[in-house]
Image (cartoon, coloured by chain):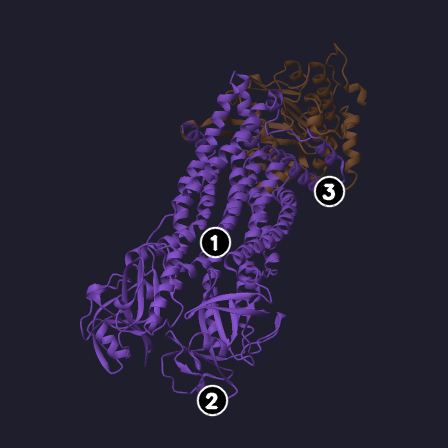
Chain colours: A purple, B brown
């Protein structure tokens, strides 16, 4: 610690810059923690709310007591149905409040409702207001929610009131908590539930939601976004590693002569090395101490933005000790490894050489130096610049790697943005409908015949299913549909037989081929279909003839969706259940809005990485120029002006920036492919990489601007320092 | 003087061509009340303390004195590589102390040659390129290489023009530094212990060549501990504790 204090006193700006650079680097690694912080926050909420392990929409049943389920901790029945109001759709949920133990609803304000009363989600109404649903007035006595319905407008009432409002006779939503909450156990529970319902003439209205291992139901959706954000931590890690290595190496190398003097006075190598390593570890430790809280902050801020924006949940503060511990270990072990190598080199440099040359190994010691000195490489300034870069190879490589990483980060972030935007567009691109009306609640409540003979309106089924462990969308549509482009990449389109057309990306990921059979778990049970085509759809979509799917769902002639190629006004039929109307333009606008949030997060992370990179370049260049201060002073002493010094430095740095930009662009390209490829493989979705080509010139200009700024600053500072003072320090 | 004359033989003695210094010629340098303080506050150290000094064009001045007397600091101020804390310095009609950084650098490049005790060659440039650089900064546009090689030939390094400083001995590096300083034919040459790192014979030979510049009318200020070398100057300025000792100024 005392040697660290002495070092800070000796060169405060450089040491503090090194500490801050390492701190920012370690902080940037905190991005890795975003998925786990987000998941941790959600799991805390899941614990608080006693989130259901299985939630299933059923046809109305009198009581959950009639269900025969094994391994169950507790089962509860609810009424759940959406009601259309002039202000929009409202979900009415009936609960037996005194006995609620699952998806617990607690008032943030007021109290739980009695008969004729309601508790509403925030923003829907105030305490004391009266809300009237289906001609039933309810006095609002509380405001609150459960995180299960965090994004919905919900009115919670007593079961009896909900039954009266919705017309549901009994309960139509079954919530289950299992003794063993593992996936396999939940799958068994779903099967038991289906059989039990079927035995009493009832059935599941939709594919049940299963939430294993104390997770939160929205975790799976959110984890995709946060994982992609977390993957940017890889880029941050690479930048941080370079910076750590460069800073540590520099700190030790610049003490070559000091160590040589100590050795010449009888200093023994081993304690000297220990001292050098101690210094590097001290600086890395100090950087980590500042960087770890910074990383915690970064992870929490990003996780909070993601959760609030996409789930409406404001998470509690959380810390990923694993990532933070790994960051600390990364800083200390990295510094130790680099310092050990550098210290060995410094203490092994022949004494005469180390004492003779104040600025590290002299230029000309290597054959490559001598060859370079004889090569015609431009004018004097160009020769100086090129050889200076070759002389301090490690520093040059450090600067170039930092610049490369910065450019790669920018290009990667931009490419992720363009790829996601392209994916969003590609996801909707095969669809030809302009407006869609879809039942909000489970089941197939609409008669397909409602579409009538209007060619511009089509009835369809959109259901959630499961293939393997993947949640997929199952579409029931007419083989002659005009709502979806039916050109397939392989095989053939639907022809009315019991076949299925599958998204090509998902099929490739899962090894599904044309001609093979695929089992799809639906609300009604597992159904097998023959794959007859692979579609260019980018999502996890399965297209089945509407009649086949309706029959498999035991609902012939029934649907839950109408599409039209025209305006929403065209769908003017009277629907027997609440429906959500959306146009393709609104869907695109929602995508754009969601993308904008993700893009902002990406850019913030990208800027942090670029900041680390710029700091790293500045730090490496500061050390580089510090080492060359005598050389620059000598240049000034014989008449070199500030502008000429700047020119020499620019001549040295600009080619490095250009090379680094080129390498960074390539690295960014492969980085994007790797990140998106990883994302595609873990999510079985086909995103495709769209390279942000336009970002390359911008990143290159930025890299050149950064080095130009550094060169100008260095030249200005060097010119201000009296030459004699610098040269006196050399003597 | 041919290059061979610079390669000393054992036991050589110091002999200078007689040079007729013309008194009362044009003033090259005029320092008034020149003061340089290192550090600040309690740690402040006055290296040069209110020095008045006038040096004429073509004059050779030896700055002598014990270590820490301020010779090198005064040399730095006279060469324009340092700025005085107070006082003024006029060189050929220019208030050097009032020039901005770039103008001062240009002034040095055009008018001054500096030889450092530690050579301060640019490590990535060959001997020839080091000299060429000085010529470039001096404004030479053509024939720099030829001039650089000629300057190196004059200091006996004809065969080592393509060597890097790290491939040269200390004496050779010092001769490159001298070639660099004299190649630009400066009006003022400031040399700090120019022979300090050379053996006696080489030192004498190098010094003899510096003295040869007087023929060109170059004003020379050199700092030395060597009384024998100092004796070759037109004037000796003794410094003690940052001040010129008045009675000790000899000519």
Q: Position of residue B238 (x, y in %)?
A: 57, 19
Q: Nearer the viewer, residue A547 or A247?
A: A547
The answer to whether A36 is drawn above or below residue A587 in the figure is above
Residue at image coords 35%, 55% = A181
Q: Earlier in the sequence, mark 3 or mark 2?
A: 3
Left or right: A136 in relation to A211? left
Question: Is there CB contact under 8 Å for labels 3 and 1?
Answer: no
Q: Where is mark 1, residue-wise?
A: A605
Q: Residue furthest bottom?
A: A453
- Earlier in the chain: of badge 2 and badge 1, it is 2
Mark 3 and mark 2, same subunit?
yes
The residue marked by circle 1 belongs to what chain? A
Determine whether A36 is above or below B217 in the image: below
Quarter of the figure with the C terminus of chain A: top right
Mark-to-mark CA distance, 3 and 2: 83 Å
Name the disc covering residue A452, or none.
2
């Amino acid at each position: 610690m005392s040697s660290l204090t002495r070092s800070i006193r000796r060169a405060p700006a450089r040491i503090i810059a090194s500490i801050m650079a390492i701190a920012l680097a370690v902080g940037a690694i905190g991005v890795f923690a975003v998925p786990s912080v987000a998941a941790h926050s959600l799991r805390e909420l899941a614990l608080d709310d006693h989130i259901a392990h299985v939630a299933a929409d059923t046809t109305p049943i009198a009581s959950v007591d009639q269900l025969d389920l094994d391994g169950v901790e507790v089962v509860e029945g609810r009424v759940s149905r959406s009601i259309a109001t002039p202000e929009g759709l409202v979900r009415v949920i009936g609960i037996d409040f005194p006995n609620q133990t699952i998806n617990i609803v607690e008032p943030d304000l007021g109290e739980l409702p009695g008969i004729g009363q309601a508790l509403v989600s925030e923003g829907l109404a105030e305490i004391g207001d009266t809300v009237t649903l289906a001609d039933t007035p309810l006095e609002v006595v509380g405001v609150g929610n459960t995180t299960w319905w965090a994004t919905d407008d919900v009115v919670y009432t007593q079961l009896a009131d909900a039954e009266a409002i919705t017309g549901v006779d009994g309960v139509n939503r079954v919530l289950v908590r299992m003794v063993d909450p593992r996936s396999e156990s939940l799958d068994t529970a779903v099967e038991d539930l289906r059989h039990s319902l079927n035995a009493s003439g009832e059935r599941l209205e939709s594919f049940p939601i299963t939430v294993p291992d104390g997770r939160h139901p929205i975790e799976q959706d959110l984890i995709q976004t946060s994982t992609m954000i977390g993957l940017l931590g890889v880029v941050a890690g690479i930048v941080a590693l370079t910076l750590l290595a460069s800073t540590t190496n520099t700190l030790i190398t610049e003490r070559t002569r000091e160590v040589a003097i100590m050795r010449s006075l009888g200093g023994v190598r081993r304690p000297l090395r220990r001292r050098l390593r101690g210094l590097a570890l001290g600086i890395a430790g100090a950087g980590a101490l500042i960087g770890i809280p910074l990383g915690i902050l970064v992870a929490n801020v990003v996780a909070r933005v993601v959760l609030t924006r996409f789930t409406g949940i404001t998470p509690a503060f959380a810390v990923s000790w694993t990532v933070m511990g790994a960051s600390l270990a990364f800083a200390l072990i990295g510094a130790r490894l680099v310092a050990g190598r550098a210290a060995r080199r410094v203490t092994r440099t022949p004494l005469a050489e180390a004492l003779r040359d104040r600025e590290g190994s002299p230029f000309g010691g290597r054959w490559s130096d001598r060859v370079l000195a004889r090569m015609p490489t431009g004018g004097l300034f160009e020769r100086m610049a090129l050889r200076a870069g070759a002389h301090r190879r490690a520093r040059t490589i450090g600067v170039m790697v930092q610049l490369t990483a910065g450019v790669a980060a920018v290009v990667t972030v931009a490419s992720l943005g363009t790829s996601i935007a392209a994916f969003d567009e590609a996801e909707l691109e095969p669809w030809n409908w302009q407006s869609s009306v879809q039942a909000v609640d489970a089941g197939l409540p609409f008669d397909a015949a409602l579409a009538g003979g209007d060619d511009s309106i089509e009835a369809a089924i959109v259901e959630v299913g499961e293939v393997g462990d993947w949640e997929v969308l199952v579409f029931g549509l007419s083989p002659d549909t005009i709502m979806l482009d039916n050109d397939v990449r392989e095989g053939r389109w639907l022809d009315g037989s019991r076949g299925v057309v599958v998204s090509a990306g998902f099929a490739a990921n899962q090894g599904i081929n044309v001609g093979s059979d695929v089992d799809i778990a639906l609300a009604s049970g597992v159904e097998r279909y023959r794959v007859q085509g692979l579609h260019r759809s980018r999502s996890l979509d399965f297209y089945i003839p509407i009649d086949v799917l309706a029959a498999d769902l035991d609902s012939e002639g029934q649907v839950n969706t109408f599409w039209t190629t025209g305006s929403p006004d065209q769908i003017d039929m009277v629907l027997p259940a609440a429906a959500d109307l959306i146009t393709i333009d609104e869907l695109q606008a929602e995508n754009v809005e969601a993308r904008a949030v993700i893009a902002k997060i990406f850019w913030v992370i990208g800027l942090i990485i670029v900041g680390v990179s710029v700091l790293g370049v500045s730090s490496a260049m500061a050390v580089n120029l510090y080492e060359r201060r005598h050389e620059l002073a000598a240049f000034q002493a014989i008449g070199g002006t500030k502008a000429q010094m700047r020119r020499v430095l620019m001549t040295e740095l600009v080619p490095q920036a250009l090379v680094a930009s080129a390498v960074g662009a390539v690295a960014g390209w492969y980085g994007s492919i790797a990140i998106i490829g990883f994302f595609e493989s873990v999510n079985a979705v086909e995103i495709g990489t769209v390279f942000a080509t336009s970002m390359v010139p911008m990143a290159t200009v930025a890299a050149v601007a950064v080095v130009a700024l550094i060169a100008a600053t260095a030249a200005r500072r060097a010119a201000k320092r009296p030459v004699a003072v610098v040269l006196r320090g050399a003597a | 003087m041919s290059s061979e004359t610079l390669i000393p033989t054992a036991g050589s003695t110091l002999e200078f061509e007689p040079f007729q210094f013309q008194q009362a010629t044009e003033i090259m340098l005029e320092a008034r009340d020149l003061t340089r303080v290192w550090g600040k506050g309690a740690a402040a150290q006055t290296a040069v303390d209110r020095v008045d000094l006038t040096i004429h064009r073509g004059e050779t001045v030896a700055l002598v004195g014990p270590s820490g007397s301020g010779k090198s600091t005064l040399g730095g101020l006279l060469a324009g590589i340092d700025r005085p804390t107070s006082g003024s310095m006029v060189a050929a009609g220019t208030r050097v102390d009032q020039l901005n950084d770039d103008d001062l650098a240009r002034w040095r490049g055009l008018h001054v040659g500096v030889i450092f005790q530690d050579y301060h060659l640019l490590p990535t440039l060959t001997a020839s390129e080091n000299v060429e650089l000085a010529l470039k900064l001096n404004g030479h546009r053509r024939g720099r290489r030829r001039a650089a090689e000629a300057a190196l030939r004059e200091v006996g390094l004809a065969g080592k023009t393509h060597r890097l400083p790290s491939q040269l001995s200390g004496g050779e590096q010092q001769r490159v530094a001298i070639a660099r300083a004299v190649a630009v034919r400066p009006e003022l040459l400031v040399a700090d212990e120019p022979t300090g790192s050379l053996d006696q014979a080489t030192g004498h030979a190098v010094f003899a060549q510096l003295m040869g510049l007087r023929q060109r009318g170059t004003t020379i200020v050199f700092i030395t501990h060597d009384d024998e070398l100092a004796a070759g100057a037109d004037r000796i300025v003794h410094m003690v504790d940052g001040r010129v000792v008045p009675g000790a100024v000899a000519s």
